[in-house]
Amino acid sequence: MSGAREPIGVIGTGYVGLVTAAGFAHLGSEVYCIGIDADKIARLQAGEIPIYEPGLAEMVEANRDRLHFSTQIDDALEHARLLFVAVGTPPTYSGDADLSAVRAVVEAIPASDRHALVMKSTVPAGTGASIKRVLAERGKTELAYVSCPEFLKEGSAVKDFLNPDRVVIGDEGDWAGDAVVELYAPLDAALVRTDIASAEMVKLASNAFLATKISFINEIANVCEETGADVIEVARGMGLDERIGHKFLQAGIGFGGSCFPKDVNALKQLAGNSGYHFQLLNAVIEVNELQKRRVIGKLQKHLGSLVGRTICLLGLAFKPNTDDMREASSLVLTARLQADGAKVRVYDPVAEHEARTLIPAVHFASDALDAADGADAVVLVTEWEEFVALDWAQVAGRMAGKLVLDGRNALDVGAIRAAGLTYEGIGRGTLTQVS
Ligand SMILES: NC(=O)c1ccc[n+]([C@@H]2O[C@H](COP(=O)([O-])OP(=O)(O)OC[C@H]3O[C@@H](n4cnc5c(N)ncnc54)[C@H](O)[C@@H]3O)[C@@H](O)[C@H]2O)c1
């Protein structure tokens, strides 16, 4: 490509597709973004960003002249050799990954010795091999294939694109793998170049490991509640061991999001389909489900029956700095609270639009104080900075009751107590006893 950056195509314009497109445009590539949702593509062409991701709108705006949005895959095929695939792979009823969008893309690419599919979507190990088989059946043997799994985190996706911990590229040692290595070279990241199946497995195993770490500390938190220990102190002491580390040792009300639940399940199913019973992952999933529901028991411990009680949920998105509601703990919580007869008031700084179609019959408040109005208990569900910084005297003034349930162990216990409120966190045995 003699000096100039390689132009690329990006198929799928969601969280991963848009960030990948904007990121490579920022590095100097012409990027041809292809989507199936004509309405969304029209909004992108008009300069509107359909998702909330810090820094993304600015990066798209700064590189508008290099970003081209279209519903026609031919626009990408004409200009680019590398076609990054970033379509969704949601779970099916069986827990396996739904690869129908990936298959649709594979079918849409014509026979060509000039193009390569670069798989960013998270797919089961073995998918690359089966796609290559399908391509061979269709007479598309010359089409190259690269696995390039994505590790960005929603909420810091732009930063993660520019400073990845590693770039994993699985290929067959051909031109396409070399071209993807070249594309990522300016980021100067640790590179793992390997075979396709191993690259696919790095992604699934990484997410499964992180989910395991979360379920582990959540179980430690539950034991702390029985023994009077404080899980924050325990995690602080554990995390200093460099073999363990501090990250993903924050106890809370369970993990959600578009990746962990589905990828853990997909790995469990992948193992099961080949006859291996992945016992550890069964436990990780079950612990997570129970953890979301433990909030109800804590509320009942303080309030008795929840019938007619008003519960305020602060935060709905599965984590701060995103509007993504996929598998958010708030979905299970609202359903359980409503099943127990409670009235639910909710507030989230950016996820309300997404949440309105998913959470029926709750009061969507205009801000945190409005959400706390008349509440018997306030539950921190998503640790947005504005909730951490709340004036608890003002919150107390709006509440009917006194309970603050800190589902993310993120709040200032002293400030909450000074406001005359009762604090309960997750796994904070010592605190609960001295209150
Ligand atoms: N969101 C994350 O944090 C994250 C991180 C790493 C990996 N991943 C993986 O990346 C993939 C995409 O995730 P996402 O969160 O960006 O999903 P998303 O739902 O936000 O976006 C997927 C996009 O693909 C589009 N699409 C579907 N079929 C298409 C087709 N045939 N042609 C063109 N576009 C099509 C959809 O319209 C949608 O815009 C998934 O496999 C996911 O597991 C996601």
Image (cartoon, rainbow, N blue to C red):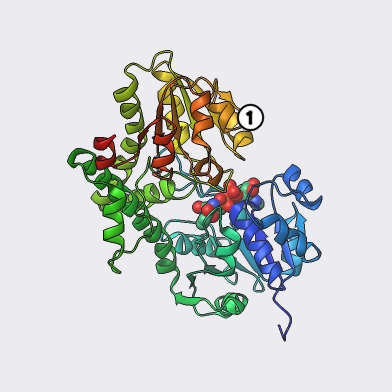
Q: Relative to residue 381, is residue 57 depicted above or below?
A: below
Pinpoint residue 81: horizontal percent, then vertical percent.
Answer: 68, 71
Q: Position of residue 55 (x, y in %)?
A: 66, 57
Residue 359 screen position, x and y as percent: 54, 27
Q: What is the quadrant of the C terminus in the image?
A: top left
Quadrant of the rendered image containing residue 432: top left
Check disc 1 and report the residue beneath it.
366
Most foreground residue, 23 or 248: 248
Horizontally, residue 207 falls left or right of residue 396, namely: left
Q: Please state the total of marks drawn on the protein image.
A: 1
Q: Where 120 falls versus 423 (above or below)?
A: below
Between 386 and 41, the one nearer to me in the picture: 386
The single residue placed furthest to the left in the displayed view is 227
Q: Quadrant of residue 142?
A: bottom right
Is residue 72 visible to us here? yes
Mark 1, other Cα within 10 Å: few <14 / some 14–19 / many ≥20: few
Residue at 65% x, 65% y is: 23
Q: In the shown orientation, is residue 425 left or right of residue 78?
A: left
Q: Which part of the image, by quadrant, shows the N terminus? A: bottom right
Outermost residue to the front: 418
Image location (x, y in percent) of residue 284: 30, 47
Q: Amino acid at mark 1?
A: Ser
Mark 1 C-beta to ligand 1 under 8 Å: no
Q: Residue furthest top?
A: 308
In front: 42, or 382?
Answer: 382
Q: Secondary structure at mark 1?
A: loop
Residue at the (27%, 66%) spot, across then down: 241
Can you say whether 355 is above or below 341 in the image?
below
